[in-house]
Amino acid sequence: MRIDEYKDMIYACGRCNFCRGQEFNERCPEVFTQYWESSTARGRMAIARGILEGKLKYSEDLAERIFGCFMCARCREECKKAAQIDVIAITKAMREDFVEQGIPIPVEGAQMADSAYESGNIFQESAKAHSAWASGLQFESGSGILFYPGCLASHRFKEKTNILVRVLQAAGYKLDFLGDDQKCCGTPFWISGKMEHATKWVQDYVDMLSERGVKEIITPCPSCFRAFDEEYPSILGVETLPFKVKHTSEVLEEIIERGKLELKNSIDVVVTYHDPCEIGRYKEIYESPRKVIKALPGIKFVEMDRVRADAFCCGGGGGVKLMFSEHSEKVSAERLVHVQATDAEILSTICPACEMNLTHAVYKADAPIRVLDIAELVAVSAGIVDEEILDPYYIPDD
Amino acid sequence: MADVDITSLLSSIVGPERVTDKDFDIIPYSRDLSPARQKFPTHVVMPETKEEIQEILRIANEHDIPVYIRGGGTSHWDAYLPQEPGILLDMARMNQILDIDERNLTVTVQPSCTFSKLDRELRKQGLTYLCSEAGGPAMTVGGSVMKAGSGPHSTAKFGYHGDSDVITLQMVLPNGDIVETGSAAWPGAGKIKRQCLGPDLAGMFIGAEGVLGVCTELTLRIRPVSNFKERLLTMMSSLDDVIEFGHFINRHVGDEYLQGIYLWVDPNEPDAFLVMMDVFGYEEEIIDHRKRRILQWLKEHGYESMDPAPAHDYFDRILTGLTDIFAAGVWHFFGAGTIAIDKIRFLYKVWKEELVEKRGYKKAGFGGQVVPRSWLAFMVTNYKEPEEWDEIIKLANEINEICHEGPLVPYGIGGKDGLMPYLASHDTGYYRLLKMLKKTLDPKNILQRGIMIPKEELQ
Ligand SMILES: Cc1cc2nc3c(=O)[nH]c(=O)nc-3n(C[C@H](O)[C@H](O)[C@H](O)COP(=O)(O)OP(=O)(O)OC[C@H]3O[C@@H](n4cnc5c(N)ncnc54)[C@H](O)[C@@H]3O)c2cc1C
Ligand code: SF4
Ligand code: SF4
């Protein structure tokens, strides 16, 4: 079993419940949606220990508790004080155990991994559709800096992605793009536990990018960012890869700090910011996005109650959006409540999954709030796009 | 247990989504913070109202099924683990702050509101509840009060939670009756006073670890936040000095000299006594005065005030979570309880001579805090599960035996793997009264069966 590898950590859980935190039912998005102790980190450690000791077996019924984890890492953050348990690694290992033991996993999770493998993207669309967002843009093949949007940004946010590239290019970045050769980074494999193709996939990708002379990848997607930054080296058992990866939050900060764009337009709106789990708690990138927002003239920036390491998930993590959509919707609706408490007109974030989930929540609640990537705010301020995109009722073409 | 479909019966009360009998949902409730043996409920149910609890208890009585109660599940003396197959009430969903009464300085909460959440909300209004325990973010007000919590913070002045901060309680009795205590019992009086109507019935439930009723609401004393604080730290070289310092603090409790004092002795340096102090109040002059008096005492006894950073770190983390608690293994507290200030010599001697020297066990530290007129003291170790389990249990039982044969009042009674056997072995009038109360209020021994009082003693 994959969890054997984590035996020491599993037994290190002293059952302090720090992971449940002061909000109790409202801290961990999984316990918020599934109620039971078995949905918290402490519960999961008890389950894992039960499995290790032969008192419990993986079962189809159990799948909702293990695959219903948003992998938001809120519990892991709290456990840093107690036992330093990597709850995410253990959750991934448990998902792998399901697959290895042939126990049915949520169909949508399996499909996501299969689609990525078969079609190169999670939406099972053609390569052409995958790069349609780039129409009208010019790239510099072999420039060494690869722009890598990932599946969600390519398919669901064509306009946002197009704007982001225009911002980067206006700031002087010479971007390469894989075009029809672009494939999913592989995140669906480790999210679903279907790892049979992962190593080859990752190795092929590294070879392909090396051959192309890629030295740096810029991506707006925190999952793709972490894939190249953490999962690839871990799967291949290497310290570093032949290329570096940057998330756009850091690139935008660089643009602002070095004055690479003239921010000529004042944006007179109230903006709040949602910390994506995978760049926040996972990578501790809290300041960069805030610095960018605060540098834009005219903006009134307001914080939500639960931010940074304490931020509540958007509901989009861990594949839950696909596997248990009703749980995902409940969490995004709750996050929207936090947003509404600030009276912000713009909810900014910097993760396509958060943008999608929160946009759906806004539509469902018919709230007069527009969900924007920080790059779009920069684009308006720099005069790259019209300020009409700030309008809560603006509907992008995609 | 009777041959009935308990899942359906419970579902008919709370709805199917708040009842579970699935093995993977049950297993997370089978351990507590201690090495107590694993014990499984047959069902876990999450009530949201007192009426639901009433109904659950009615069914339990009807079918003779024991009911156990869990708040945050962070206690460490086998105090909620099902001693025999039964229903476990997971109180998690009753976690709301019901009313903050700024004028009367009271707050009313549901039992599973965490201290941490309560403090955060009170502070928004410049108020606070002085929680003395160090249980971290998920310890609940109800769980703590039901076992009369106490700890490193604020104890010198305020003592155990149950001493003065609980104003009124709302309890569901084992037979389903709902009662309120103190002024809350008088129609229209409000939740303002604990001791005002006959005997103090709140006191009967505080520390009873749920054996006499399920707590569904608590009203607590709150106060404005204090703006000034000082943390001090010193290392003393003799236990006699620590004891005298304890008396010095105790004598000035009325003057609010000091709110917290925490003693720690490392097993590898058993003659070095680390003392951390927390002084806080409303006026800078008063805090300065208190600090001056403490420094003067230390100077007169040849001690220096050291860098207070560890004291800041410790006291600031009481509600948010102390750090590295399981870095060297999981916890076991033993030799723990209430003891008169002078008698801490006895406990220290047991720790040093019996544990460290005779048994050569150098992984358990000795600690405590001064509470008015007493210490709340303990020994604590980090050990590796499962390989060190047998050793730690044997050792802890031997030490507990010696301590509780002496003047150490057990803190946290719990079940058979807690300190219940020590309480049960003392045939005192107190214990006989407790059993009488239990038999009267809970004739079928439904609530917390096997906790605090062995089942056989109630038959
Ligand atoms: C890091 C850490 C530090 C700690 N420090 C301290 C300390 O300084 N002092 C201290 O005393 N303890 C300490 N503890 C232990 C623990 O946190 C406390 O005992 C805490 O008060 C327990 O609260 P809980 O909500 O987890 O209660 P639980 O463990 O859930 O329950 C405690 C008892 O109350 C009963 N109970 C719970 N809810 C109800 C209810 N609604 N009605 C009736 N009975 C109920 C239970 O059956 C059980 O007997 C510490 C624990 C940790 C993890
Ligand atoms: S914080 Fe860590 S050690 Fe504590 S209960 Fe949660 S998982 Fe276990
Ligand atoms: S990772 Fe997030 S959703 Fe999963 S158990 Fe931890 S806090 Fe809950």
Image (tube, coloured by chain):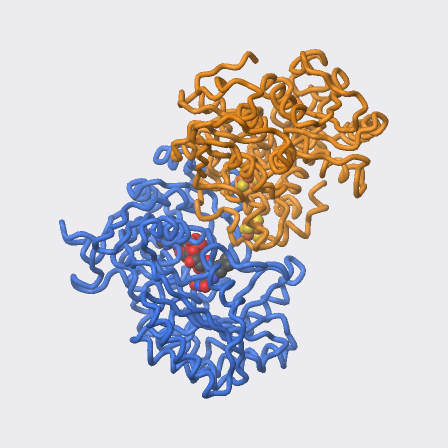
Chain colours: A orange, B blue
User: Would you say A198 lies left or right of A387 here?
Assistant: right
Q: Quadrant of ligand 3?
A: top right
Residue A104, by quadrant, is top right
**Residue B351 picture location, percent across and down:** 55, 78
Q: Nearer the viewer, residue B179 or A189?
A: A189
Q: Residue at the spot x=36%, y=66% of the render?
A: B160
Q: Which image quarter is the N terminus of chain B in?
A: top left
Height in image: A307 above or below B219?
A: above
User: Would you say B139 lies left or right of A82 here?
Assistant: left
Height in image: B4 above or below A221?
A: below
User: Would you say A209 lies left or right of B245 here?
Assistant: right
Q: Which image quarter is the C terminus of chain B in?
A: bottom left
**Residue A47 picture location, percent across and down:** 59, 44
**Residue A223 picture location, percent across and down:** 65, 32
In this view, the residue farthest toward the right is A211
Asked whether residue B271 appears in the rendered view, the answer is yes
Count how many numbered circles sit on residues in the image: 0
**Residue B225 picture location, percent across and down:** 33, 59
Q: Nearer the viewer, residue A330 or B306?
A: B306
Q: Residue at the spot x=59%, y=77% of the render?
A: B355
Q: Residue at the spot x=66%, y=27% of the render?
A: A171
Q: Residue at the spot x=55%, y=39% of the render?
A: A291
Q: Nearer the viewer, residue B214 or B376?
A: B376
Asked whether residue B458 appears in the rendered view, the answer is no
Height in image: B130 above or below A351?
A: below
